[in-house]
Image (cartoon, helix red, strand yellow):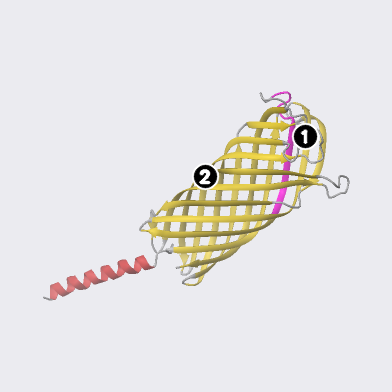
Amino acid sequence: MTRLIKIHFLSLIIICGYLCARGQNIEKQLQLSLSTGHQKEDFNWSIAGNSNGQSPNVFSELKWKNVNGQDYSATLQWNVWQKVWIFGSYNRVNVKSGSVSDIDYAADNRTQPTYNQNFSDNKGSTSGWYAGAGYTIFNNSLFSLVPYVAYGVNKQALFIVDETGQFPDLNSDYNTEWKGPFFKVRSSLKIWRALKLAADVTYNQVKYTSQGNWNLINEFQHPVSYRHAANGYGVDAGLKLVYNITPNIGLNIGYNYFNWQTGNGNDQLYLATGQVDKTQLNGVYRKGGWFGGGVELSL
């Protein structure tokens, strides 16, 4: 009888331990993260003189540097069934400042410049939405690991303006769209009591399209003067510290880095005469980072 009691008591301890471990999973069943911060990025593209990438190999190049502004974002994660998760997120950056250079060349390898002008970008935005599903590999009181397969759309509204007063009517724009599937891995590690470290890495496979308007050039059509199309990829990585001030409310601070690019693509220039000139898009590149913080609510 005593042996039977001991067996039942040991079984009760094991069951209680299991239930407690489940109740203390580092990733809660429902989580909402609201954040704000500052984002800065560099963005550039160039075209060749013809569709073969020659005459010259870099004919015109546009570079936006230090395009920065305030970011607002929201992310929802939900453990809908057993080990299955779904998530959705949205972010938007309101551009406040940045510089733009526009350079044309007559010879290969960016030699013999024929035009070189610097402008500004003091407005516009970048935004993105993302949604997907994941599966729990680990989720206990100390560590979690959840890979996701998802789809996202990221857009940019960039501008070229002149703040010196030399070209007061200059208001050219360049609007992009990066969209496609991505693979994300999220993990969390408990550091001390209510403090945890969260990290994520994402690989994006994207289709890139864009359109621009050279508003002061009468030889081009308006409002769409040219279009770009190419295939590309992007890598994102984030790291943040989360401190739970209560079991259901946490504060976070973190940094995100991103680096996206395309291969060669197509450039189509629409002339006012109705003619369409085609050449090679040499590639599009964007990289930057975000730093900020926010609040996390969980159940």
Residue shown at 75% from the left, 33% from the top: 60
Residue 289 magenta? no
Furthest-right residue in this view:
166
Magenta region, residue range: 54-68
| Residue 214 place in picture, x, y as percent | 77, 39
Query: Label 2 neighbourhood size at 10 Å, few (<14), some (14-19), many (20+)?
Result: some
N-terminal of the pair, mark 1 or mark 2, is: 2
Q: Quadrant of the N terminus?
A: bottom left
Camera-nearest residue between 86 and 139: 86
158 sits to left or right of 89? right
List the residue tagged with mark 2. Answer: 203
Residue shown at 53% from the left, 51% from the top: 130
| Residue 216 place in picture, x, y as percent | 82, 40
Query: Label 1 neighbourhood size at 10 Å, few (<14), some (14-19), many (20+)?
Result: many
SS of the residue under disc 1 = loop
List the residue tagged with mark 1. Answer: 220
| Residue 226 place in picture, x, y as percent | 71, 35
33 sits to left or right of 41? left
Q: Quadrant of the C terminus?
A: bottom left
